Structures are given as structure tokens and as C-alpha cells.
Image: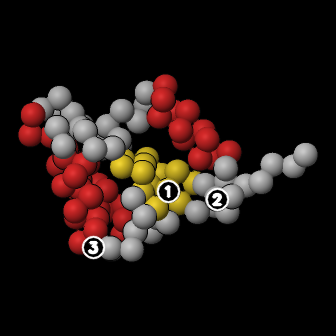
Amino acid sequence: MTSKRIGGGQKILVVDDEHMSDLMRSVLRRLESDGFRPIVVAPEGDHINGDDYEAQTLFAMETERPSAILLDVRFGEYDSDRFKGLSILKKISDRDSSMPV
């Protein structure tokens, strides 16, 4: 039996502050095994917050041109970031309302 690779090499932007968790590594492996090319948004530096993820996500939308975005809603340890994913979703939609998220 042959496996069907449905992704066809399409890029999927992955935006999750816990991208190194066991669960997210499993998701990334599954995307790859299905033929997708996951691109992880992973800001670097000290004291990273939701704004860093937002800026890097919007930048990656322009530079990577993903076919879809996998977006976490809850970010970080700060109260101001608790639902940062919803803010990022709005900005994604404002830039490209046809982008599957």
C-alpha cells in the first residue's frame, strides 16, 4: 500500500509559543509525513512575548508565502499575551482574508 502525500510541498506556517513541546513536534512530524513543509515561527531573544510572535508571523507571511497557518490562540506567561493569537488572527485576516488559519 502506498501512502498518499496530500501536502504537495505546500508551506504551513506554524505559530505556537510551545513549538518545542512533544505535542507540537508530533504535529510537525505529521505535517511533514503528509507532504507539507512546516515553517515554525520562533522568535529569538530574552523575554519574548506575543508581540514578537505577531511581528515574525506577519513578516513570514510576506517572505514565505505559506498556503495556510496553524495558529495557537493562547501565548506566553503574561496576562497581556493570554489571547494574543486572536490579535494575530485579526492582523492575518486584514492582510489576506483568504488565508486558511
Answer few, some or many: residues within 10 Å of disc 2's Cα (few below 14, many 20 plus, some between 14 and 19).
Answer: some
Asked if labels 2 and 1 touch by Cβ distance under 8 angstroms, the answer is yes
Judging by the rendered image, the residue that carries numbered circle 1 is 12
Distance, label 1 to label 2, CA atoms, is: 9 Å
Q: Position of residue 27 (x, y in %)?
A: 53, 38
Horizontal relation, residue 99 to residue 34: left or right: left
Residue at x 22%, y 52% (from the top left corner):
86
Horizontal relation, residue 80 to residue 39: left or right: left
Instruction: Mark 2 or mark 3: name the one nearer the start of the chain.
Output: 2
Distance, label 2 to label 3, CA atoms, is: 24 Å
Q: Amino acid at mark 2?
A: Gly
Judging by the rendered image, the residue that carries numbered circle 2 is 7
Residue 63 in view, yes or no: no
32 up-or-down from 68: above or below: above
Horizontal relation, residue 67 to residue 7: left or right: left
53 up-or-down from 63: above or below: above
The circle drawn on residue 34 is none
Q: Amino acid at mark 1?
A: Ile
Judging by the rendered image, the residue that carries numbered circle 3 is 95
Determine the secondary structure under disc 2.
Answer: loop
Residue at x 33%, y 44% (from the top left corner):
72
Residue at x 47%, y 34% (from the top left corner):
24
